[in-house]
Image (cartoon, grey):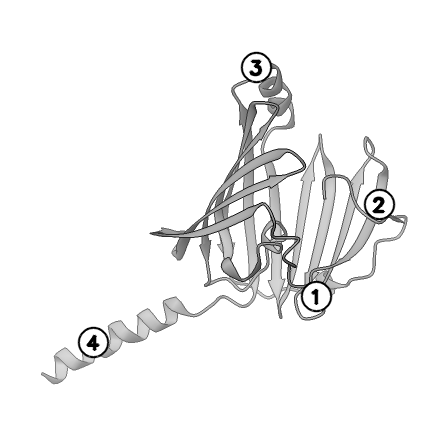
Amino acid sequence: MKKYLFVLLVVFSFSAIAQDALLEGVVTSKMTMSSENSDVQAQLAMIGDIKSVTYFKDNKTRTEVNNPMTGESISIIDSEAKKMLAMMNNPMVGGKQYAITDIAKPSEEDLKGMTITKGDETKTILGYVCNAYQVLMNKDGVNMTMDIFSTEQINAVNQQTTSFGADFKGFPMYMKMTVNQMGMDIIMINEVTEVKEETVDSEKFNMTPLEGYKKVDKLPGM
């Protein structure tokens, strides 16, 4: 009996550790885009996979994206200060620009045209238990469907989900976005490929814009 109880305690201990949230580390993700329209697909193929690296620590998150076709972008979110610094360096669209925005709780107006449904399905991705969500959006005449698997075991913020409100929880490990515009679908799949628990330098979350960047009210695509 004592041996049986010991085994149960060991199993419980490991289960408790597995459920603890990861508070500091680095997440690597990859986005692929596709379309059934041959002309659009040719353009998307030129862009290729878009890789991103997200650093997180002390309720702060920094995401870096670098792609030869779309340029460089950095977004830093301070969840406690409710602020986001976004910087973009794209010679094709305005060059070096930055914007600082509030990320306060979404208003009823912000949530208009958006439906968020939490599903019953769960999936384990890279060892993290994820809940299923479906998000339906209609904005400026564009319909978007998002199928998401999100984990509450990673204490990081995702820029795309900050506007979802209290109905959505966690960090997306897998997102499939189907955008319909003028009767044509574009499918974007963003999936986490690696999660590393490691010490992150606090300087990465410095909210001071990089030198040479011009302030704008809003960045293209945001």
Amino acid type assigned to the residue bearing label 1 in the image: Lys
Looking at the rendered structure, the secondary structure element under dot 2 is strand
- Residue 96 visible in the displayed image: yes
> Sequence-wise, which precedes: disc 1 or disc 3?
3
- Residue 170 visible in the displayed image: no
| Foreground tag (1 vs 4) | 1
The answer for how far apart the CA atoms under marks 1 and 4 are is: 43 Å
Residue appearing at x 61%, y 23% in the figure? 182
The location of residue 214, given as percent across then percent down, is 89, 48
Residue furthest out toward the left:
1
Amino acid type assigned to the residue bearing label 4 in the image: Leu
Total count of labels: 4
The residue singled out by tag 3 in the image is: 38
Looking at the rendered structure, the secondary structure element under dot 1 is loop
Closer to the camera, 216 or 32? 216
> Sequence-wise, which precedes: disc 2 or disc 4?
4
Residue appearing at x 64%, y 21% in the figure? 43
Near mark 3 (Cα within 10 A), the count class, few <14, some 14-19 or many ≥20, is few
> Sequence-wise, which precedes: disc 2 or disc 3?
3
Amino acid type assigned to the residue bearing label 2 in the image: Gln
> Sequence-wise, which precedes: disc 2 or disc 1?
1
The residue singled out by tag 4 in the image is: 8
The answer for how far apart the CA atoms under marks 2 and 3 are is: 33 Å
| Numbered label attached to residue 97 | 2
